[in-house]
Image: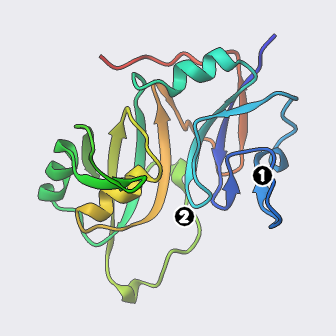
Amino acid sequence: MHRHFLLHKPHGYLSQFIYEKKRSKKKLGELFPFPDGTMAIGRLDEDSEGLLLLTTDGMMSELVRSKTVEKEYFAQVDGIVTQEAIEQLKNGVEIGFKGIRYTTKECKARIITDLPDCIGEGRRIRDERHGPTSWLSITLTEGKFRQVRKMTAAVGLPTLRLIRVRVGTIDLHDLKAGEVLEVSDFQVAVSS
């Protein structure tokens, strides 16, 4: 019988259970006694936070990672988000990926004015005297290496904090950073 989990990955953890390099890194297995064979579906880099789905079912992993399932991210950015920047993000921006220039696919983007409680305060990003910050939402079906960070930088708004809040129809719920919820399965709706 396969097992499935929702995790609010905190900042500073790798989205893996084993780290082969010499440096000591915090890994997912330190947060919860996951069963043998558990794998993270997709990844969040060490600096990113938020919803991570974990499973012992490789077929489920393939479905969720497909380009038909939306992934929504909240990004705290350096500066004030404008409607012009939102339109650029929606229409696709040019970023670098593996040494090649790439224009992102159309996506959903919006300014966020009220954050849900599950976001929490997080780690201190910087002092207010360094200028204003603001939040935006980006929803993608693709997900190249550090894509959201590259997209916000391309419109002049470097990402300071990045949180995945939704995968398909599964959201972060009220999970606080580091909390795990075991679920019976993942019912993810595919986008049309």
Residue 48 left/right relative to 2: left
Residue 165 left/right relative to 138: right
Residue 176 left/right relative to 190: right
Mark 1 surroundings: few (<14), some (14-19) or many (≥20) residues within 10 A: some
Q: Earlier in the sequence, mark 1 or mark 2?
A: 1
Question: Who's the residue at 81% across and 54% down the image?
Answer: 20
| Residue 58, percent from left and from top | 68, 19
Q: Quadrant of residue 72?
A: top left
> Which residue was labeled with disc 1?
27
Q: Quadrant of residue 10?
A: bottom right
The amino acid pointed to by label 1 is: Lys
Q: Residue furthest left?
A: 84
Q: Which mark is residue 121?
A: 2
Q: Nearer the viewer, residue 102 or 33?
A: 102
User: Which SS class for mark 2?
Assistant: loop
- Look at the image and tell me in which quarter the C terminus lies: top left
